[in-house]
Amino acid sequence: MLAETEPYAALWFRWDEGGTAEAVTLPDCPVPPLDTDADACCLYSGHPERHTWDVAAYSEETSCTS
């Protein structure tokens, strides 16, 4: 993620299989955390794998933009 561009969306870089990068605005992941005190997922809608609130590497000390 490069930057938040608007409410509920952010600017991301993505690469194709040939290695060409493009900047795209993608909507935020809409899935709420299981713990009501946890932060929302920091990834984009439809992302693969787990949500950031479900990964130990993303702790309370790490924000989505740091």
Image (spheres, rainbow, N blue to C red):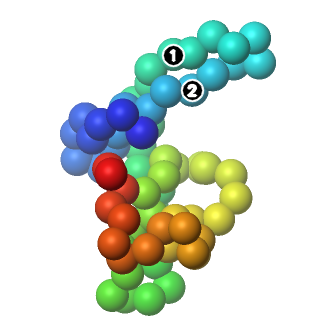
Residue furthest right as drawn? 17
Instruction: Decide: few, some or many residues near mark 2? Use Cα within 10 Å; few <14, some 14-19, many ≥20.
Output: few
The disc at residue 22 is 1
Relative image position of residue 7 (x, y in whole percent): 22, 47
Is residue 48 shown left or right of residue 5?
A: right
Mark 1 → mark 2, Cα distance in angstroms? 6 Å
User: Does 34 sit left or right of 10 as displayed?
Assistant: right
Going 25% across and 35% down the picture, which residue do you hit?
5
Q: Is residue 46 left or right of residue 6?
A: right
Q: Could one spot residue 13 in this view of the protein?
A: yes
Say which of 66 and 37 sits in front: 66
| x then y, percent, for residue 56 | 57, 75
Q: Say which residue appears at 27% left-offset and 41% top-offset.
A: 4
- In this rendering, position of residue 45 left or right of residue 36: right
Marks 1/2 in contact by CB < 8 Å: the verdict is yes
Q: Nearer the viewer, residue 44 or 59?
A: 59
The amino acid on which the numbered mark 2 sits, given as a three-letter code, is Arg
Which secondary structure lies at badge 1? strand
Residue drawn 37% across the image and 88% down it: 36
Q: Is residue 31 visible?
A: no
Which residue is located at x 44 percent, y 24 percent? 24
- The x and y percentages for residue 14 are 57, 26
Mark 1, other Cα within 10 Å: few <14 / some 14–19 / many ≥20: few
Query: Which callout, 1 or 2, points at the residue further toward the start of the chain?
Result: 2
Residue under label 2? 14
Hey, what amino acid is under mark 1? Answer: Glu
